[in-house]
Image (tube, rainbow, N blue to C red):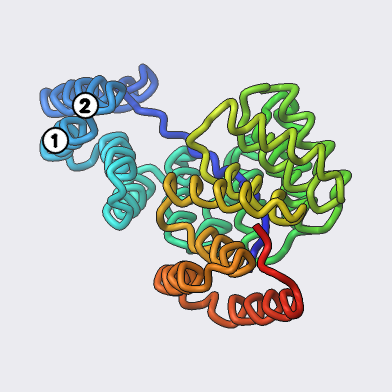
Amino acid sequence: MKRTSILASFIIFQSICCWLSPAAAVAQPLTSRTVTASAYIERGAAWFSKGDYERALADFDLAIASDPGHAEAYYNRALARYRLNDYERALADFTRAIQLKPRYTAAYVDRAGVRYQQGDLDGVISDCDKTIELEPRLAIAWNNRALARSGKGDHVGALADFDRAIKLEPRRAVLYNNRGVARFRLRDFDGAISDQTRAIKLNPEFVEAWSDRGAAREFKGDLEGALADFNQVIKLNPRFAIAWFNRAIHWQAKGELERAESDFTRAIELNPNMADAYAQRGLVRLMRGRSDEAQQDFDRCLALNVNLRQSLERLIDETKQQMSGRKPMR
């Protein structure tokens, strides 16, 4: 069972195509049908920019009905569906856009994003490989392939891809934080802290970087540094559940169980589906002599993630052994 949460960020284009480029217009003389499709795309893009994805989707539907061969219409509709969490149909639209326009780099990048959401890491790598073949200086393709490689356990390969992405875009904070996560997973805590510090310098309000640096400091044994980072995350974004969870782990490690329980509770309030938070709060309540409440937390943890059963049972046994001969801690 994980004890500290770290984050990495997948990057997608999500660039709405409002109208045909002049080059495309020369290659394909405008007809009334393509003019209509472009008008619908332009209006759909306006709705999209306002966050009204349902209306955007309706206009992109009309664009496709007007011109079924318009690759940008499928691409834009895919983005609207992505924002509406309709991943299956978004995937189909990105694929259709690529069929119509085989060198459509943005469609490969964003289809990889959908596949990442679906857990299809091999598909992500395939789309990123094609993107890199078409546009080798596109840093986000290297970043995204790195994340897929890391997800498959190839942290060394991921690190190499993050290195390449940073060489291409040395002032993009998210790339440093992502590389820091890869270094963390390779137990290079100093390297992780260095990268996350760089990310914070580039973007002082980058809450994920503060949180991840706190995790690396915690694992390195710099408990005060970790606490300072978790406090900063909560200051920047009080609704960032992982920061409350991580700070609770810090209090738990120091034996400050009342504080730990309070922070685990806040994490659960912000994210009621955080199985680990229920497990850890249950352990704290068990140590505080409230076994009935602890069992309720354990039951909720397993209802959310039954795969945690073995590790949870081990932690409960270890906690009970530690408590043998001791009074419940407050």
Circles 2 and 1, Cβ within 8 Å, touching? The answer is yes
Residue that appears at 79% across and 49% down: 218
The N terminus lies in which quarter of the figure? bottom right
Q: Measured from the top left, where is residue 237 in percent x and y?
A: 53, 30
Label 2 sits on residue? 44
160 to the left or right of 231: right
12 to the left or right of 318: left
- The image shows residue 297, relative to residue 131, as above or below, that is below
Q: Measured from the top left, where is residue 238 in percent x and y?
A: 52, 32
Residue that appears at 53% across and 58% down: 277
In this view, the residue in front, 65 or 236, is 236
Report whether residue 164 is seen.
no
Residue density around tag 1, few if under 14, some if 14–19, many if 20 or more, within 10 Å: some
Q: Amino acid at mark 1?
A: Ala
- The image shows residue 302, relative to residue 235, as above or below, that is below
Label 1 sits on residue? 58
Report whether residue 92 is seen.
yes
How far apart, in angstroms, are the residues tagged by discs 2 and 1? 8 Å
- The image shows residue 205, relative to residue 131, as above or below, that is above
Q: Residue furthest top?
A: 22
Q: Amino acid at mark 2?
A: Gly
Q: Measured from the top left, where is residue 261 in percent x and y?
A: 57, 53
